[in-house]
Structures are given as structure tokens and as C-alpha cells.
Image (cartoon, rainbow, N blue to C red):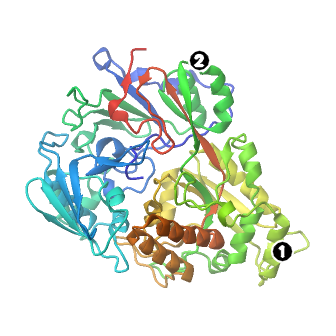
Amino acid sequence: MIFMAIKAWRRWLAVILALISAIALSSCNPDQFKTKAAQVPQFVFVTPSSPATFNYPLNQSLFSIFGYIYDGLITQNGITAAVEPALAESWEISADKKRIVFTLKDNLKWSDGQPLTVDDVLFTYQDIYLNPKIPTDIKDILRIGNSRAFPTIKKLDQRRIEFIIPEPFAPFLRFVGGLPILPAHALRESVYSTGSDGNPKFISTWGTDTDPKAIIGNSAYRIESYIPSERVILRRNPYYWRKDAQGNPQPYIERIVLQIIESTDNQLINFRSGQLDSLDLPPEGFPLLKREEKRGRFKIYNGGPDPSTLFVNFNLNKARNSKDQPVVDPIKSRWFNTLAFRQAVAYAIDRNTMKTNIFRGLGDIQNSPVQPQSPYYLSPEKGLKVYNYNPEKAKQLLLNAGFKYNPQGKLLDAEGNQVRFTMLVKAEEKSRVDMAILIKQNLSQIGIQADLQVLNFNSILDKLENRSWECYVGGFGGGGVDPHSGANIWSSQGRLHQFNQGPQPGSPPIKGWEVSDWEQEIDRLFIEGARELDETKRKAIYAQFQQIVQEQLPLIYLPNKLSFEAVRDRVQGVKYSTLGGAFWNLYELKVSEK
């Protein structure tokens, strides 16, 4: 998540509407805002949702622009996953693996032309990421070992900065070194001044109501303009540090347009009419666009199983909110926290039918929180537990756990309460809505009533953050080959530990939060896996983690689509991979004239 440039999120093909208004189409047409003066090399992406914020440390949305405007000290090669220099030209690791020294490239600059120095690096880590008054998920990545201690950071000279960690930490370079560096000259005052609520003004700084040109970055692009629900336009950063072998400045593409199009119908229509330069193609749309590949002058890349994960899960939180009210109805909480109930739901879901009907067979059955491309992946053949469709087994598990059926076939708990709950799903992805509909149908076959609630993604984020949800059909983006990329999900203290979200800095307090034994064991395994440098032993540690997840089912995994990306022929230099997608090397891509 940290290293891959944020690309337009996964879209799915909807049923093509027979009639689409010409007015509706023109509102999404990039030609409508071009002028003769603006005819520059540009690339048009699509995203289904507006950005939630322009403040990187506070962002929790999948739909953002940060991969375009920020770099870290190091980056990751989108083909090999190798760690490579970015803002740092080199680094040294001590023999005991507890001291890492980065040397910055010379003459780095911010997108406003100001010098980027070691002081910015120190400010980013020490004053923002590690600031106890700033609520950010980044802290989960920076905690090390049993003590969950943070690294200590010291400026050595004008180009070198030192990190001291309490114990060897295998993921340090890949995750800690890759965090975006932020501008001290633009943000320091907001960090050290407080608002009327007593919190740092930084928390309300750089929202989406900020003048986009005031947002300062250090990567290939800077924000030129933003029209909510319509588009974000990014312009080439003239101070970007990358140059090609001949010394020419990169990137080559002058402008990036992010069209905000929620409807998957309109996304497809815009791509087929030539208004978009790429489309993250769902398997169900593959046969249609494959026939048009030559005529439409685009190429479809196949990267195999998508590295993201899709799941259905329940809110396991037993806490009470600041008003002393349970965050989950206690009756429903007892169901959700019954292991046999979660396992019954897993057996009740017909994932093969999902794969066949929703992904047209062009998908893969997901069983693990670790992607199959990872060397740490534990396959079913090597002992990972799976839940093949078996509604009769699901019913028996429920009966054995004290549930019962009334004469109408509805499931009741031991006290006679009907088993009924609300299932959230985001509106922007039709295939995910289709999955939720099938889950609802599957659960009805074992007497469970799931009431579907389809909301836009930002509304769902609010519910997740407030813990005001019962069941959720969700997903997480691919985080790379190392399982530690999911630390903020799997750590019981993590800000993305959604299924049992603990107290968080800057959020209203909760009471009575409980961490289960198996969550504590996952905490231990992640600490052990991060400090272990022997790869064979690391694989064994993360195999235990995967077995616990599949036994306890905090997330019940759903099928994943194969990864297809349609890209216009006029885009030159694409090096597609499932790990990095089509645009991980955006800085060296070129576009030819239409």
C-alpha cells in the first residue's frame, strides 16, 4: 500500500444501459475542459470516488492522490519488489541490524521550489508520524517489538539521518523507509499550534476544501485543481528529482486527469468512447473488450489473481461508546462472537457460484490474508483450512451452538431472537454489491436474514470509524509481498483493525473493549515475524498467522477477480505486473499523439 503509486481503484462492469443521455456523457468528457492552451501530453484515469482528504497521515480512504505527489526515502520496484532508492540515494545497516543511516540525494526540492532536507525527514517522522496528538495509522507501522517502541531518529549532518531501533526489524526498509516525506516549512506551524478543541491545527489542515495549489509535495506531480465529484487535475512537478539516463527531467506526461465517475456503466462507456486512457477491467467485461482490442487501439494486460482481498465480516466489538451505549446490540454481538456462527456463515456462502456468475469464471478463490504471489502464502494443499460450500454443515454448526429453527425455517438464537442483521456494502463497485446480494440469498437458505444497506464509500468509512455497523462486505488493497504490510489491520491496536476497533487517539473514548486470546496471539506472531531475519522461520511464523485467521474467521474471504488492465496503445513504456499494476513506473511513461 505504501510503495505502489495510487492508481485508479478496481472497477467492475455493470449491465450496459440501453439509453444514456448525451448530457450525462458530456459531463464526464475531458474534452469539455480542454482549451488550445491546455493541449499538452496528458493521461486520463478514472476513480469511483472523490478523495477524502489532502492530508496524507490522516487518510483512510483507498481513493487518494498521494501516490502521485509524495515519495519516501526508498521505493519498491513494481516488477521485482526489490527495494530501490528514492529521496535517499543510499543507506547503511549496522551489523546488529539496529542502526540504519540514510543519505539523501543532493539538491532535492519541494514542488514549490523550496529545498527538501534532512530537517524535513526528521520533522515528518518525529513531529507528525510519532506525534501522540496526531491520530494516524502510520504509528502502527512504526511500532517495533514486544514493547511496541518507536525508533529514535537523529540528524547526523545536512544529508544523513539515523534511525535506531530496539531490535532487528525485518520489514524496516520496505515499510518504514517508504513512508512519504512531508514539508516542514508548510506544515510545522499547524503541528505546533492548537485549535479551539485543543488539538493541533494540523488535524484540520489540508482538507479537500484547501486550495489544491497550496498542497506541497515531492513526487512526480502536484495538484493543479480539484472539482468535487468531477475531477482532480495533476500537473508535472518541475522540481521532481528523477531524470532519465540522458539527464532529461521526468515525468514525461505533463498532466494527469483523474475523472471521478461513480457509475461503472459510465466508466465503461467513457473508456469505449476513448475518453479514458485505462480501465481496470473486471473479468465479466473481458470478453466484450477483448473483441474490441484491435479496433479500439488498446491492450488488455493479464496479471493473474488480483493482490487485493475481498471479504465479509462481523463487528466483534464488545465495547460501549462515550454515551455508555453498546457499539453493537448485545444480542447480535453474542451471535457474531460465537465461532460456530462465523464458521457456519463461511460454509453457507457459495463462493464458486460467485466466481462463475460475477467473475465469469475469471477469478480465484481466496482463502488467506496473504496473497498467493507472496513467498509467505500458505496454500490449502499445505494445511490452510478452507470452507467449501456446505449449507447442511452450516445448519448443523448452528444447531450445535444452541441456535434453533422456527416452523417457517427462520433461525432463532437460544432466547428466541430472530437472527437478523444489516450488511453494509459500498455502492461504487457493482460486483461487490452483487456479492452482497448472493451472500444475502445464501444466508436466507440457512434461515438468516441479512438486510442490505448500499452506501457510498465515504459514508461507509464514517460508520466503520464510529464502530456503528454490524456486517460489512469489504476489501483491502494489495499491500505487497510481506505480510507485515497488514500490521495496521491485524494488530489489535491497529487503526484498520475494523472487526474489533480499539480506542484511538483523537477519537471519543470507549469502555470495556476486549481483545480475544487469538487476537493476542496474532499480535505476538507479527512481532516475532518482524524481528525474525531467517526467511524459513518467518514463513513458519506467518503460516501460523494464516491458520489462526482461517480458524477464527474475523474476515471470511470471498473470490478475487483476475487482474486485467486495458491501456490505450498511445501509452508507451508500460511494464505491467500484478504487484505494481500498469502504472508503477508512471514517471517514465510517454503518450503519443492521438
332 versus 77 height, above or below: below
- Circle 2: is it few (<14), some (14-19), or many (20+) Cα within 10 Å? few
Query: Is residue 409 found left or right of 131 in the rendered image?
Result: right
Q: Position of residue 328 (x, y in %)?
A: 58, 75
Q: Secondary structure at mark 2?
A: loop
Residue at 35% across, 56% down = 174
Q: Position of residue 592 (x, y in %)?
A: 39, 17
> Residue 104 or 499: which is nearer the viewer?
104
Snapshot quadrant of residue 193: bottom left
Q: Kindly identify which residue carries mark 1.
A: 396
Note whether residue 233 is visible.
no
Q: Amino acid at mark 2?
A: Lys
Note whether residue 103 is visible.
yes
Looking at marks 1 and 2 on the same chain, the residue that comes earlier in the sequence is marked by 2
Total labels drawn:
2
Residue 18 numbered tag? none
Q: Secondary structure at mark 1?
A: helix
Snapshot quadrant of residue 272: top right
Query: Is residue 144 found left or right of 376 in the rendered image?
Result: left
> Residue 139 or 504: which is nearer the viewer?
139
Q: Nearer the viewer, mark 1 or mark 2?
A: 2
> Residue 555 or 433: which is nearer the viewer?
555
81 versus 287 height, above or below: below
Residue 294 numbered tag? 2
349 versus 148 height, above or below: above
Q: Amino acid at mark 1?
A: Gln
Q: Position of residue 256 (x, y in %)?
A: 36, 31
Query: Is residue 64 found left or right of 343 in the rendered image?
Result: left
582 versus 307 height, above or below: above
